[in-house]
């Protein structure tokens, strides 16, 4: 199969050669996926970096640090194209240069971008990465689309790193699905008084690994790593 250009949207079905086998771990794997970008990236080991849309400056910094270190180690950085931590993780991977990539899982059809301020980022990812959705073209941003998106992030990744999250954050959905699927879950601690750290603390209480550096994530994940 030829790799589509960044302007083309490719549709693949469950059972196709390029369909990610990890999605079959879900009880409801999507019957088809829409893809825009380099489909070959689906063969890379993936690590998700997710967190709050209302991230702190420190959280955005940590998202960039983790995304770049994990990317340099040979992982494909996966996130959900949202504001805050997601966008920072995607952008940080792209900033490393053309030999580094990121994958965005969207809660809309691929003919739309949500949030609107990430139109430029989405275009960059289509040229230097891959954008994925199970939603058909024309699908707008509905509230129930985003938990569905989060389950794909959880299934695709071998590990999920939660940078900042409130106690009712959608990132906790991603983390809990990941744990249920047997993926590794990592969470960064924060100030006990910070509302956007409460979700991370809850995950740690529930068994997520507390991490303070990308090295600690890499020590727990088995894939062919590029020496740092």
Image (spheres, rainbow, N blue to C red):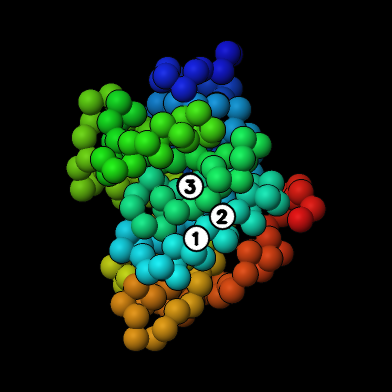
Look at 36% across and 32% down and name the residue there.
134
Which mark is on residue 144? none
Q: Please say whether residue 176 is visible from this viewpoint.
A: no
Residue with the most extreme top position? 2
| Residue 200 place in picture, x, y as percent | 43, 73
Q: Which residue is mark 1?
A: 63
Q: CA distance from mark 2 to mark 3?
A: 8 Å
Look at 68% across and 65% down and name the residue there.
215
Crowd rating for badge 2 (residues with CA inside 10 Å; few <14, some 14–19, many 20+)? many
Look at 76% across and 56% down and name the residue there.
228
| Residue 127 place in picture, x, y as percent | 50, 28
Quadrant holding the N terminus: top right
Q: Are marks 2 and 3 in contact (CB under 8 Å)?
A: yes
Which mark is on residue 90? 3
Q: Nearer the viewer, residue 174 or 138?
A: 138
Q: Is residue 185 above or below residue 111?
A: below
SS under mark 1: helix
Q: Nearer the viewer, residue 203 or 177?
A: 203
Q: Is residue 161 left or right of residue 115?
A: right
Q: Please say whether residue 6 is visible from this viewpoint.
A: yes
């Amino acid at each position: 199969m030829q790799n589509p250009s960044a302007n083309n949207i490719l549709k693949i079905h469950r059972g196709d050669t390029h369909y990610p086998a990890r999605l079959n771990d879900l009880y409801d794997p999507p019957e088809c996926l829409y893809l825009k970008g380099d489909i070959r990236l689906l063969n890379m080991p993936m690590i998700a970096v997710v967190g709050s849309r209302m991230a702190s400056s420190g959280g955005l910094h940590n998202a960039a640090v983790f995304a770049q270190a994990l990317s340099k180690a040979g992982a494909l950085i996966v996130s959900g194209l949202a504001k805050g931590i997601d966008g920072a993780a995607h952008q940080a991977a792209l900033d490393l240069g053309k030999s580094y990539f990121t994958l965005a899982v969207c809660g809309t059809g691929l003919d739309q971008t949500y949030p609107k301020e990430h139109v430029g980022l989405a275009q960059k990812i289509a040229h230097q990465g891959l954008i994925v959705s199970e939603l058909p073209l024309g699908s707008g941003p509905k509230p129930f689309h985003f938990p569905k998106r989060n389950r794909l992030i959880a299934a695709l990744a071998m590990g999920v790193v939660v940078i900042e999250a409130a106690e009712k954050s959608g990132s906790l959905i991603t983390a809990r699905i990941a744990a249920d699927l047997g993926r590794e879950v990592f969470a960064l601690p924060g100030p006990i008084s910070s509302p956007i750290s409460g979700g991370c603390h809850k995950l740690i209480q529930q068994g997520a690994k507390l991490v303070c550096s990308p090295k600690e994530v890499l020590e727990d994940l088995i894939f062919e790593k590029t020496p740092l």
